[in-house]
Image (cartoon, helix red, strand yellow):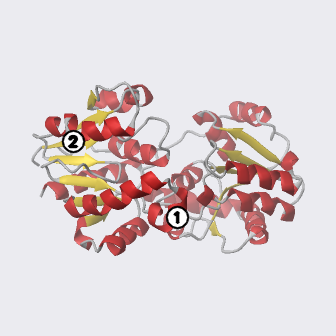
Amino acid sequence: MSSLDVAVNLLWLAPGRVGGSEEYLVRQLAGLPSDAGINPVLYVQPGFATAHPELCSRMATEVIPFRRDWRGARLVAEHSWLAARTRAADVVHHGGGTMPVLGRRPALVTVHDLQYLDYPEHFSRARRAYLHAMMPRSIKRAALVATPSEFVRSTVIDAFAGDPARVVVVPHGVPEIDPPDQAFQASVLQRYGVADRPYVVYPAITHPHKGHVVLVEMLRHLPPELMLVLLGGTGPAEAAVRSAIERSGLSDRVVRPGRVPGPDRDALIAGAEAMVFPSRYEGFGAPLVEAMVLGTPVVCSNHAAVREVVGDAAIVVKGGPAEWAQAVSDARHRRAELVEAGHHRRQAFTLETSGQALAAAYRLAAS
């Protein structure tokens, strides 16, 4: 098998600030098979190597010579510094959904989703203008487009009249997660105030499409001992979520730790009666698979990408708060069945599966 030199443009990636797309690409790259003949060079912002030392220890890495995380500087660098350094690459992989105007190598562009078309109100005017200008151009110029799900693939083809042969699915890869030992889990549950009561958990930033409010309203229809744990940082819908909690009169049943360390997050998911996932828009939804890995039943929305990920290993909800409450009750009774189904379903989303799909996409783009 011939060797392939791949330049991976991660300059758009501000470590710790871009959410699921960072996790998606880092895991994909980590899953690249060592015997595939793929030689990646990562082009990154300062701080990336600190955030992902294991990946950078395995792969050649070049850091942009700018100190400030500023979009304007990044765009300039893509058209100058990056273009100069990737001239000899067989393929340039642009992981942020768009590619610079300059660049002569065959390009693979990863499109995480097209939410800006379905929910334009969630984006600033400047961001919308940039995406409307750059996304169609990037997809047209790319040798190949990679998406995390068949849902995103179909939306790309429909929105831009793309050639189906040039749009491929490279799924998320979710690593094995060691279950927390009993002592650690007990200490975590005690620390976050849920040691003595059952709870459901939702790990998501408070973006408008994430649907936190329906979970607050759901509590009215569930036994009073059941708690709701909301993990994740604050987003544009934070005020609406806080208002819903205050109006509900159930603030004593809602725990909001914010962002928590990874081991704590895993322990909270593993100890939950179910992970609830009411998001109205996803390109994939990695927490769905992470819950399956940790042996936690999943109750989720009816969004197309979400249904695609969970298959028959979750309870899918099509209604409002009362229907969510009924689904949670069903998940508690069907726990063993859902946990077993989740362990089988997660096999479609291993690091190896994702990395092999990415290697195949690189070779297809180069050809």
- CA neighbours of label 2 inside 10 A, class few (<14), some (14 to 19), many (20+): some
How far apart are the alpha carbons under marks 2 and 1?
29 Å
Q: Residue at x 81, y 52 (%)?
A: 245
Residue 365 is left or right of residue 331, and the answer is left
* SS at mark 1 in the image: loop
Question: Could you tell me residue 64's position as x and y percent?
Answer: 29, 29
Give SS at disc 2. Answer: helix
Determine which residue is flagged by label 2: 79
Image point (85%, 48%), residue name: 251
Compared to residue 333, the image places residue 196 above or below, namely: above
- Picture quarter with the C terminus: bottom left
Query: Where is residue 38, by image quadrant?
Result: top left
Asked whether the viewer can see residue 273, the reply is: no
Looking at the image, which is closer to me, 341 or 280? Answer: 280
Residue 17: give x, y in percent of width and height.
49, 39
Observer-nearest of 88 and 285: 88
- Residue, x 74% and y 63% (percent of image)? 328
Residue beneath the point at 49% across and 66% down: 305
Q: Amino acid type of disc 1?
A: Tyr
Read off the residue under disc 1. 119
| Sooner in the amino-acid sequence: mark 2 or mark 1 | 2
359 left or right of 121 in image: left
Rendering coords of residue 224 (x, y %): 90, 55
Disc 2 residue type (three-letter): His
Q: Nearer the viewer, residue 282 or 12?
A: 12
